[in-house]
């Protein structure tokens, strides 16, 4: 494909998730690729993809059915665990979504490079919150 794409003259230039969301919402028949969260928040129509089990569903339908199950037992139980075996794409199961991405942080285990103890503690609390069921439940609300 290369670094430069020769787009058709009818292509709309849209920048960033918000810009692409606006282009899709404001132009009848427009097709674009954005994070499902942006599209769902705007009430945009979403395509359905066929998963490995042959079932067509939207990302919202997969999430409601428990899309996290696609990772099976491959997700480590701790943030400092080994993520090298995690496989989220096109996993088996009726409720799986074939395209899954996960956000992550790279953080040194040795935090001695941060001289301020309070800052080190704050970083550890911040990272720990991602595995805290209470915090996760609050975020869902």
Image (tube, grey):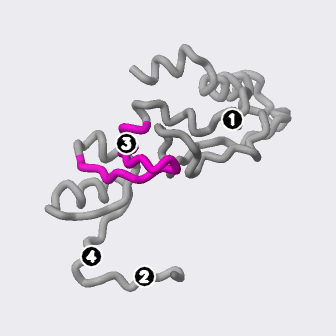
Seen from the viewer's position, the closer of residues 32 and 106 is 32
In magenta segment, residue 45: yes
**Cα distance between the residues tagged 2 and 3:** 27 Å
Give the structural element (helix, strand or loop) at label 2.
loop
Seen from the viewer's position, the closer of residues 1 and 68 is 68
Which circle's residue, 3 or 1, is located before the other in the chain? 3
> What residue sits 52% from the left and 80% below the top?
3
Residue 75, placed above or below residue 25: above
Per the rendering, the mark at residue 5 is: 2
Residue 117, placed above or below residue 110: above
In magenta segment, residue 3: no
Give the structural element (helix, strand or loop) at label 4.
loop
Q: What crowding class fits label 4: few (fewer than 14 Cα within 10 Å), some (14-19), or many (20 or more)?
A: few
> What residue sits 43% from the left and 53% below the top?
50
Which residues are drawn in magenta?
Answer: 44-62
Residue of label 3 = 37
Give the structural element (helix, strand or loop) at label 1.
loop
Q: What crowding class fits label 2: few (fewer than 14 Cα within 10 Å), some (14-19), or many (20 or more)?
A: few
> What residue sits 60% from the left and 46% below the top?
88
Disc 1 + disc 2, Cβ < 8 Å: no
> What residue sits 18% from the left and 64% below the top?
29
Q: Nearer the viewer, mark 4 or mark 1?
A: 1
């Amino acid at each position: 494909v290369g670094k430069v794409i020769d787009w058709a003259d009818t292509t709309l230039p849209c920048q960033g998730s918000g810009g692409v969301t606006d282009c899709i919402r404001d132009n009848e028949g427009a097709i674009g690729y954005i994070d499902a969260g942006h599209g769902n928040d705007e009430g945009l129509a979403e395509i359905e993809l066929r998963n490995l089990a042959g079932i067509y569903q939207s990302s919202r339908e997969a999430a409601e059915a428990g899309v996290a199950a696609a990772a099976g037992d491959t997700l480590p139980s701790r943030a400092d665990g080994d993520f090298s075996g995690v496989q989220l794409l096109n996993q088996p199961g009726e409720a799986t979504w074939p395209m899954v991405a996960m956000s992550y942080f790279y953080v040194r285990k040795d935090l001695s490079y941060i001289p301020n103890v309070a800052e080190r503690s704050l970083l550890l609390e911040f990272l720990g919150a991602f595995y805290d069921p209470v915090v996760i439940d609050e975020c869902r609300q």
